[in-house]
Image: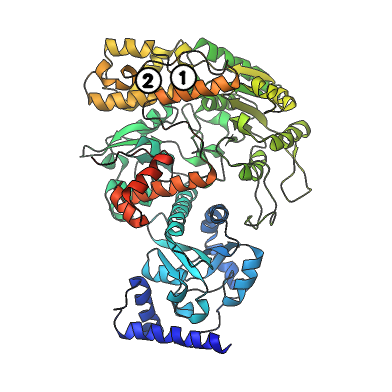
Amino acid sequence: MTLTLRQGDRHADRVLDVVRRGFHEEGNDLVTRSWSRCLNQYQLDPGRPREPVVIASSALQSRRNQHADVIECARYEMTTLYQQLADAESAVVLTDTDGVIVHMVSSPEFAAEAEPMGLRAGGMWGEAEAGTNGMGTCLAAAHPISVRREEHFFSHFTQLTCSAVPVFDPSGEIIAVLDVTSRSSLMQQHVLVLLGMTARMIENRLIDKRFSNAHPLHFHSRPEFVYTLHEGKLAVGDDGRILAANRSALFQLGVQTMDEIRTQRIDDLFQTSLEDIVQRSLSSSFHPVVAYRANAALRFFAVARRPASDAATPARARAVGAIAAPMAAEAGAEAFRAPLRPAAARAPGIRTFKDARLVAHLDTARRVVARRTPVLLCGETGSGKEVFARAIHETSPHAEGAFVAVNCASLPETLIESELFGYKAGAFTGAQRSGRRGKILQADGGTLFLDEIADMPLELQARLLRVLDERQVTPLGTEETHPVDFQLVSASHQHLPSLVREGRFREDLYYRLAGIELDLPALRDRTDKRDLIHDVLKDEGGSDCRLGEDAERMLMAYPWPGNLRQLRHVLRSAAALADGKTITREHLPSLAARPAPSPASAYALPAATAEAADAQGEAAAADAPPAVKLNPIQANERQVLLQMLEQHRWNVSNVAKALDVSRNTLYRKLHKLHIEISPPD
C-alpha cells in the first residue's frame, strides 16, 4: 500500500513539474497540453484522484435514445474490432460528445475489473471528470490520440493504455469517440489505424442510415478502391445537390469541410449529371464508370444508384430502370468481407443478356424457382454468376424479399457460422449484447445467394444441409428454432463433383443444392461478345471512345481466361492509353505481351487442373492482383497498410518512417501482401 502511494506521489510530482516547466520534457504534446488544462482549467489535483462519475440509468437511457442511430451503426463494427484485437484484457468503447460511455464491448472478466474505475456504460470520461485519458482528451483535442499508462493525469489510471479516435457525422461534426482501453504497454500505432478504419465504417453506415432517400455515389481515383473503405462517398438528392460526404470524399475532391460543397450539385463536381451516372452505372452492372472532375483533368471511377428507400417499394411496382438497393443489412469489417455489389435492376438487367444460352438459362430458372427448386450456377471466375443470380431473384416469387449474398470464400472459418446462422446475446465473448440475426434469417422471404459454396467448411455443410431439409434455423447459443422460407441460389467456379469424389464436399449437400445446374458460358463462348466489348468500352471510356478494326479483331479473337473482369481491366487501360483517340492494337499491350492461355473451360476439368487453369487465367488479367488467399491476419495487415499508404498519399518513405522500419523491409512486406507499388529507381 505504501509503495502504491509513493508511486502515485511520484507520478503527481512529474505531472506538476512538466506543466510548470512549460512542456520542455520530451513526450506527447497532446498529453502535456491536456495536463495543463486539467491543472489550470479544471482545477484537478493529480495527487487526489476523484471518485468515478457514473450517471443514473435513466439519464444513460436518454443519451442512448438520443444517439440511437450512431450506436446502431457502431455495434457490429465494435464487435468485429474486438475480435480482431484478440485481447481478453481490453474493451472497445463508444462515448458521446460529453465523454459518457454509451456502448462497450469487452470480456466479462475485464469489464468486472475495470468497472470500479468507471469504465462501464454511463461512466463519464471527459477531461473535467477523469483528467487526461484517451476518450476525454480525444474530445478536447478533436484528434486521434494514444494515452499510455503514465501519460494519464491521475495515477490510478496508469495501469491502462487508451487509444481513441473521433467519429464524425455526415455534416463533419464530431458525434462520438471510439476508444480501445487495455492493459497493454506497447505502442498503439496499429490500434489507432484499426480504430480509424472502424470509425470510417461507422461514418459510412451513418450516411446510409440518415440519407436513405438520397442517391449514394461511390468514387475513387483508382477503380479497385471503389466499394472499399478508401472510397469517397456522397449522398446526392433528387435535384442533384450534395447532401453529405465522407472524409475520403472531401479529401479526394480537395475540400476541407462539408460546408464547401453542401450547396453544390453533382455536375459542379464532375463532368456528368446525376441521371447520366446512374444510368451508366446500371448499364455496367454497377462496375465503376469513368467520371472526370469538373474544371480539371482529374479522372475518377464512380458508381451511383437509386436511393436505398426504393427497396421498400414492391419490386413489381417499380418503374422500369429502378435500381434495387443492397440488401445486406449488416455490412462488416473490410478485412473480413468481400465488398458488397449493388443489385441490378430487374428489366434492364435482363435485357443485357443477349446470348441465347443465357436467355434460355434464365427462362429455365424462372420456371424451376416457381416450384421452390434450388439453383446451382457453375462457371469460370468472372463469368457473371452473381449478376445472373440477381436476375433470377428479380423474376422469382421471392422478388418482394431481400437478396442476401454471402461469399463463402471471403469469410474466415471462425465467422462463417455466426454470419449464416446468427447468435443470441452472450453466445460468445465479444458478441453483441442484443444478439444478431444471421444471413439465413435475413433472407427469409427472399433469396439466399451462396457464392463460392465449395469453400464452405465441411462441418458447416452439415448444418446448412439440415436447414435446407427442415427449413428451420437455430442461432448459436440457443435451442430456439425459427422457420425460414427462401429461394436458394448457389455458385462455384470449382467442379463440385470432383470435390465430392475427393471427400472435400458433402455428396448429400451437392445433390440438395443442384436441384438444377446451370453452366454459364465464358466470355469467349458468348454470342454477344461484340456487344459486350462495345458496352464495356462505353462505360470505361465514354461514348466518344472508338475502337479500331484491328483492335476489335484482336479483342474478338482473344480467349479471355479472366472473362468479364479481365475485359473490363483491359478496356479501362486501353481507354486511358488512347486518351481520346481511336483504340488500336498498340493500346492493348497486356494482350500482345504474352500468349493467351488455353481456352479450355476450367470448370470442366478436375479440381486440381481447374485451379491451375484459374491461376493461369488470373495472371493474364491486366492490373489483376495475384489469385491467392490471405489468412485473416494477413488480410488485416494488408488493410492496415493500404490505409496508411492512403493517409500518406502512397509515399512509401513516409509510411516506413511512421512504422519505424526500413523502406526495404516495407517493400518486402508490400510484395508479400500483394500490394502493387513500384519502388523508386
**Taking the image as drawn, is residue 238 in sight?**
no
**In the displayed structure, does residue 642 sit left or right of residue 79?**
left
248 versus 192 height, above or below: above
The reply to whether the C-beta atoms of the residues labelled 2 and 1 are less than 8 Å apart is: yes
Q: Residues within 10 Å of mark 1 (few under 14, many from 20)?
A: some
| Of callouts 2 and 1, the N-terminal one | 1
Secondary element at image label 1: loop
Nearest the viewer among 547 and 417 is: 417
Q: Residues within 10 Å of mark 2 (few under 14, many from 20)?
A: some
**Taking the image as drawn, is residue 448 in sight?**
yes
Quadrant location, the N terminus: bottom right
Amino acid bearing label 2: Asp
Q: Which residue is mark 1?
A: 352
Q: Which mark is residue 535?
A: 2
Nearest the viewer among 490 and 302 is: 490
Could you tell me which residue is drawn at 50 percent across and 49 percent down?
A: 209
442 versus 206 height, above or below: above
Quarter location, residue 363? top right
**In the displayed structure, does residue 453 sit left or right of residue 233?**
right
Nearest the viewer among 259 and 93 is: 93
Quadrant location, the C terminus: top left
Q: How is the image coloured?
A: rainbow
Q: Position of residue 622 (x, y in %)?
A: 36, 26
Secondary element at image label 2: helix
Amino acid bearing label 1: Thr
Quarter location, residue 667? top left
